[in-house]
Image (spheres, rainbow, N blue to C red):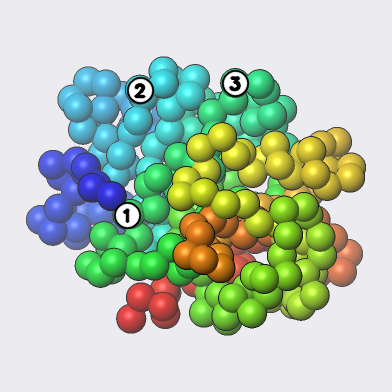
Amino acid sequence: MTITVSARWSVVAFGLLIALSWHVAAARAANPNTLWNIVHGKCVPDQQQHGDPWPCAKVDLTRGAAGGFAILKDISGATQYLLIPTRRITGIESPVLLAPYATNYFAEAWENRGFVPWALLRPMPRDTLSLAINSDVGRSQNQLHIHIDCIRADVRQALLSQRSAIGPRWAPLKILLAGHRYRAMRITGETLDGQNPFKLLARGVPGARADMGRHTLVVVGMMFAGDVPGFILLDDRADPAHGDWGSGEELQDHACALGH
């Protein structure tokens, strides 16, 4: 995939990005609207007025503001990026995500996974890359954001060992991931076009549609038998009383050991 980035998104501006990122990190700790303020107040206006999405790496408004999104480098880790809608959507619990013509934000996030190998300066196989959204109790921000980053090496190995047993319908994994019992299903295809993980969760897991906010979703690229490209989808429901905050981000590696 060819990545188009802002003219300022260069080695010359890297120091400014780091300084801004630390400022953003401090703001995020205190303000759950920080991501929305950055995208709505800075990235989108800069893209519209100057053709430059700074401080975001990318702003895509080709579907209009209602279906647009921004890509922002996260302070955590060298390779983590966030896909953030340019419309106000609080999180996974929003009914907007299940509307008939809803933007498939997971598909857009996968199409922009190339920012991760770009940061590493090396190609990464699809089964090393992942997307994650946390539950309403497992997140720090009240603007929908999908984490784009490497998968943990141990999680990758566990999924590789289980991939032949994962079917096209949601079912509990036989093994724990990060100490939690996830459900899993497989889908095939090079991309997620026409296969929206939010809708697959709402349709396929009993009770999920009425309780989406407590769920976390993770999408991991995979190659199945016969060199068939696809994905493993993972779902967990938050259970704070037992130490499970529904944070699928726990399966990602923001240090990206698989890239070194």
Q: Which one is closest to the eye, mark 3 or mark 2?
A: 3
Residue at image mark 1: 115
Residue 228, given in percent of the width and then of the height, sits at 51, 59
Residue 112, given in percent of the width and then of the height, sits at 37, 47
Q: CA distance from mark 1 to mark 3?
A: 27 Å
Q: CA distance from mark 2 to mark 1?
A: 19 Å
Give the quadrant of the C terminus. bottom left
Q: Does dot 3 land on a helix, a strand or a loop? A: loop
Residue 212, given in percent of the width and then of the height, sits at 77, 41
Callout 3 amino acid: Tyr
| Front-most of residues 185 and 28 | 185
Q: Which residue of the protein is positioned furthest toward the left in this rendering?
A: 12
Q: Residue at x 46, y 50 (%)?
A: 190
Q: Residue at x 64, y 31 (%)?
A: 97
Specify whether 1 is left or right of 238: left
Is residue 213 visible to the viewer in this orientation of the structure? no
Label number found at residue 62? 2
Determine crowd level at label 3: few under 14, some 14-19, many 20+ residues with C-alpha closer than 10 A: few
Q: Earlier in the sequence, mark 1 or mark 3?
A: 3
Q: Earlier in the sequence, mark 3 or mark 2?
A: 2
Determine crowd level at label 2: few under 14, some 14-19, many 20+ residues with C-alpha closer than 10 A: few
Callout 1 amino acid: Phe
Callout 2 amino acid: Thr
Residue 55, given in percent of the width and then of the height, sits at 29, 42
Q: Is residue 228 above or below residue 67?
A: below
Residue at image mark 3: 101
Q: Residue at x 45, y 40 (%)?
A: 108
